[in-house]
Image: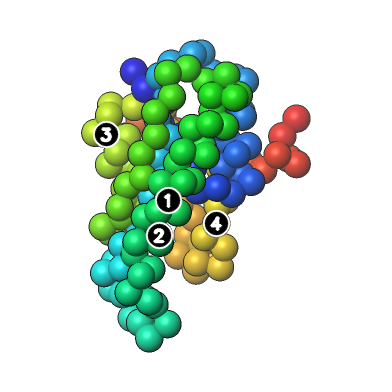
Amino acid sequence: MTILVAYDGSADARTAIEFAAKHLAAEPTMIVTVWEPLLVQLRKYPLAAAAISPDTGDEAQAQAEAHAKEGAELAIAAGLADVTYRAVADNESIWKTIVDVADEIDASLVVTGSRGLAGVRSVLLGSVSNHVLHHARRPTLIVPPAKTLR
């Protein structure tokens, strides 16, 4: 089985990796970063279309790949075993993409931080971690911010 860790570069995502490495048995681990292609951004945020550059999609993919690699490096440094990483395009929603990848790889556990980089969007739409928790068909671990951990 494989542990799937959702990673977006946020402090909470880093804490989730560190917590997983400290408390979980060594299993293969996949770090997943989800990015939104330009057409998805335009569909989700039509009023922002004028502000979205055509290069945004390429930049988003490159940034997601960099975040996923960074997450894998953090996971290895923290002691997680057999770490791989992927940047995955979001075709509908970030949480659904995480759940779909977990199903695809038959993850034994999904790990995510309680808050990520979504900021105001998560207040308006609900957090990614909350949706993953309620829609994943497998165990899910949501790690709170480092300052609240004991």
On the image, numbered disc 1 is attached to which residue?
64
The secondary element bearing badge 3 is classed as: helix
Q: Is residue 76 above or below residue 132?
A: above
Type of the residue with mark 4:
Leu
Q: Which badge, 3 or 1, is on the more N-terminal residue? A: 1
**Mark 4 and mark 3: span between their CA atoms?**
24 Å
Type of the residue with mark 1:
Ala
Are discs 1 and 2 less than 8 Å apart at CB? yes
Q: Which badge, 2 or 4, is on the more N-terminal residue? A: 2
Answer few, some or many: residues within 10 Å of disc 1's Cα (few below 14, many 20 plus, some between 14 and 19).
many
Type of the residue with mark 2:
Ala
Are discs 2 and 3 less than 8 Å apart at CB? no
Res 91 → quadrant: bottom left
Q: Residue furthest top?
A: 25
Q: Position of residue 74 (x, y in %)?
A: 57, 32
Which of the two residues, 85 or 102, is positioned nearer the viewer here?
A: 85
Q: Is residue 108 above or below residue 87?
A: above
On the image, numbered disc 2 is attached to which residue?
60
**In percent of the image, x 56 and y 42: which residue is there?**
13
Q: Position of residue 3 (x, y in %)?
A: 41, 25
The secondary element bearing badge 2 is classed as: helix
Name the mark nearer the viewer: 2 or 3.
2
On the image, numbered disc 3 is attached to which residue?
103
Q: Which badge, 2 or 3, is on the more N-terminal residue? A: 2
Name the mark nearer the viewer: 2 or 4.
2
